[in-house]
Amino acid sequence: MARKIIVGTLISGGGTNLQAIIDACQENRIDAEICFTGSDTPCVKGLERAKKAQIDTFVVDYARIIKDCKQHGIKDTDLPEDFDLEEMVSKQRLMVTDASKEQVAFFLKSRAIAERKLLDLVLAYEMDLLVLAGFMRVMTPYFIDRINTEPGQHKIMNIHPALLPAFPGTDGYGDTFRYGCKIGGCTVHFIDYGEDTGPIIGQKAFEIEDTDTLDDVKRKGLEKEWALYPHCIQKFAESFA
């Protein structure tokens, strides 16, 4: 066994991928140890899974933060001291081209306020890798640059419910099914400034039968995810050693 890497995890919901990673760690199938599980949503089942495994947990309530920004506006004093809007606008590849400057600015500013609160908690831990295990918030360059501090070294891993680069976005299995594909799959990749555009680490595929429903596609995909994510974390651990 190699030295165990220290992994932080972020979730938004039930945490089935988190559970697969917890099980792999506890059964020594991967050289990793989870140091925390954070969520953008309070009271989700994934937090219970982490607590049961005696993993530190915390919540940064994105929905409340964004609602406050919409209701009360954003003052310069609300923003992190190291936030530079022009720099973030030049780097970001998340907003559609027809978005107004005001929309882009609000998106980047409101997310930076939430991300700073998240960073204050995440960076309190010494971790080698941050794993997004069903974290349903896109990361802006503000967050990414404060995790990926060494040029060319990616430290944020994500799983996507499609065989990238096909079907990026929030509904990969649904898009795969509606397009009529006969092969579906999932992808683990590193995060970059775009939406599901970062370097691919691993993929698993499955056949879609003519009689399959969307629920069947999602079930098959999740089963592949639970095997793929620990495998890719172990691949990182071996390259990190």
Image (spheres, helix red, strand yellow):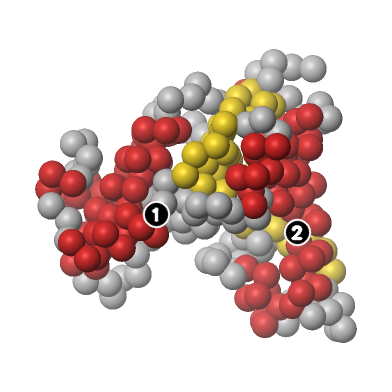
Marked residue nearer the N-terminal end (2 or 1): 1
Percent x, y of residue 231: 75, 39
In the rendered structure, the answer to whether residue 48 lies left or right of residue 29 reads left
User: Which residue is at 70% across, 49% downward?
Assistant: 17
Percent x, y of residue 224: 79, 55
Closest to the observer, 156 or 215: 215
- Label 1 sits on residue: 62
Q: Secondary structure at mark 1?
A: helix
User: Which residue is at 79% across, 66% downward?
Assistant: 219
Tell me which corner region of the image, top left, top right, bottom left or bottom right, holds residue 102.
bottom left
Three-letter residue code for mark 1? Tyr
Percent x, y of residue 78: 18, 46
Closest to the observer, 140 or 89: 140
- Label 2 sits on residue: 222
User: Which residue is at 63% across, 76% downward?
Assistant: 175
**Viewer-nearest of labels 2 and 1?**
1
Three-letter residue code for mark 2? Leu
Percent x, y of residue 100: 22, 71
